[in-house]
Amino acid sequence: PTIDTFGSQVLNNGQETVNFLLIGSDKRSGASFRTDTMVIAILRPNDGQVSLISIPRDLWLPIAGTGGEQRINTAYAHGTQTLIDTIEQDFDIPINHYVEVDFLGFQELVEAVDGVPMYFDKRLRDEQTGLNITRTGCITLSADQALAFARSRHLEYEVADGAWETDGTGDLGRMDADGYVYFMD
């Protein structure tokens, strides 16, 4: 069967799974290139299922071809293939396809789908990214809000009227399905 993914044709060729490495990159003028987000999307065309595996950017492991260990997001600075080789080497997951989105592309994607609906059970903020979720419940994030949430590294949540607590879980907290944020269908 043929799967239409991100507007391109991907042929299954009888494979049980097709694996995509999805990268959110932090490419800015004058900055070293690192990945902000890494997700492996495992498509099972034969049964129509998709699984997502989020890789914490600060995960420390051997970087393919370098002879050294470092955070996985630094593998990207050696090139896309080094990142792919590192994932294949350390997770034993073959990568069939690669998709990269920078900040602008991320915002354009969110705009193309008219925002990202998410459920929040607490008010959230991150003064460094500008994230400011002022109410609980289902909220459709704009492109700017979605980027601020995705880039949040200093997240705080309200514990009582006017009292805020820092969320120390970082990347792992944002990946936790049992946390305070849920994607809506």
Image: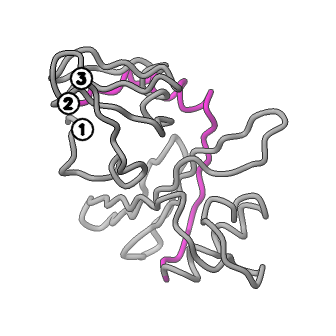
Residue position marked by numbered label 2 in the rendering = 119
Query: In the image, residue 149 lies at what x, y percent?
Result: 42, 31
Amino acid carrying mark 2 in the image: Tyr
Q: Amino acid at mark 3?
A: Ala
Q: In percent of the image, x 63 and y 69: which residue is there?
A: 84
Residue 77, percent across and down?
Answer: 76, 58
Marker disc for residue 181: 1
Residue 2 drawn at (x, y percent): 43, 57
Q: Secondary structure at mark 1?
A: strand
Label 1, label 3: how far apart the Cα atoms are = 19 Å
Direction from residue 173 to residue 127 in the image, left or right: right
Give the mark nearer the N terminus: 1 vs 3: 3
Q: Work out whether 8 lies above or below 68.
A: above
- The answer to whether residue 1 of the structure is visible from this angle is no
* Residue name at image x 27 percent, y 53 percent: 176
Picture disc at residue 163: 3
Instruction: Rate crowding at label 1 as few (under 14), some (14 to 19) or many (20 or more) other CA atoms within 10 Å.
Output: some
